Image (cartoon, rainbow, N blue to C red):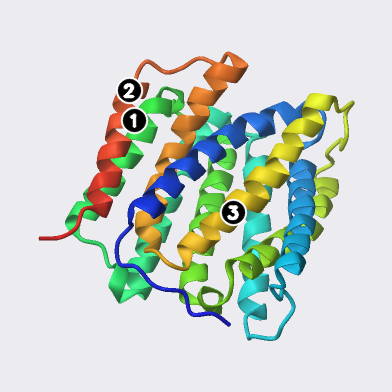
Amino acid sequence: MVTPQRHLHLDALAMGLMVGLCALWGLNQVAIKLANAGISPVLQAGLRSAGAAVLLWGWSRWRRVPLFDRDGSLPAGLISGLMFASEFALIFWGLDYTPASRAVVFLYTAPFVVALGMHLLMPSERLNRWQVAGLLSAFAGVVLAFGENLSLPSGKQILGDSMLLAAAVLWGGTTVLMRVSRLSTIRASKTLFYQLAVSAVLLPLVSVALGEKGFTHPTALTWASLALQIVVVAFASYLIWFWLITRYPATKLSAFSFLTPLFGMLFGAGLLGERITPFLAAAMTLVAAGIWLVNRRRG
């Protein structure tokens, strides 16, 4: 068991890492789209978790970091793994019912779940009015960038929107669980291993239950996109994210996640030729202002 050093505020290291992580997660959205052409989405997520779990196990063996010692974290670890797997199943399933550009707005309500959970459960992370204003500003930026897709929903879209909202609650809830449970006292590698191992088992089963086609003529680009997701995203970036969560305020870290869909839009335009909303510059400004308000020091 370890006792991470706690920080009340984000330093330059944490902020730099978060911007880098959000850029990677935005690029990951493009990698998923490219891999979808050859591998069904939920199966793809399961393969990603399985590959990253193997990498994490090998890395932990090399560094002699125990993953299977008894430290009382098993119940919370299994719950976090179930939440992690359910989140991705709902995201990919929900995208069958609602457009991705619309889904982004609902999914990125997750930082509000984190903020509320930490406000209620961790006195040291209670929100002030400036932080609430910052979260609202950042969310407004996401809505501005993608809001043209928020027309009145059909019955099918309501179902998809509900799935994305449920996924956002699970995403935010997993972050809160990692801060308030025994998971906050163990190594980030073990916390990540719980989530990868459980989702590696469950997501392929969900793929079969959903009737996915599985592999549909994957190309070299398909496998390269999957490899990027395994090595860079699910292994490296998630390990850094879990390390940050155990050391810095969860609400302040989560505020940076509003950058992810905007980075995804930029990468989608540059690599896939997708259209950029004319409001992107204003959206970036609102998100940046929101992050600053959430992280500004009192007094």
Answer yes or no: is residue 39 visible. yes
Give how far apart the Cα atoms at labels 1 and 3 are: 24 Å
Instruction: Check if mark 1's residue and mark 3's residue have beta carbons within 8 Å.
Output: no
- Amino acid at pointer 1: Met
Asked if the residue under mark 2 is in contact with the one under mark 1, i.e. CB atoms within 8 Å, the reply is yes
User: Helix or strand or loop: what does disc 2 sit on?
Assistant: helix
Which residue position holds label 2? 281
Mark 1, other Cα within 10 Å: few <14 / some 14–19 / many ≥20: many
Q: Residues within 10 Å of mark 3 (few under 14, many from 20)?
A: some
The residue to which callout 3 is attached is: 238
x 29%, y 25%: residue: 282
Residue at the left extreme? 299
Q: Secondary structure at mark 3?
A: helix
Q: Residue at x 70, y 86 (%)?
A: 70
Q: Is residue 129 left or right of residue 282?
A: left
Instruction: Where is residue 261? Give x, y as percent.
Output: 48, 34
Circle 2 residues within 10 Å: few <14, some 14–19, many ≥20: few
* Residue occupying the point 48% across, 80% down: 3
Q: Earlier in the sequence, mark 1 or mark 3?
A: 3
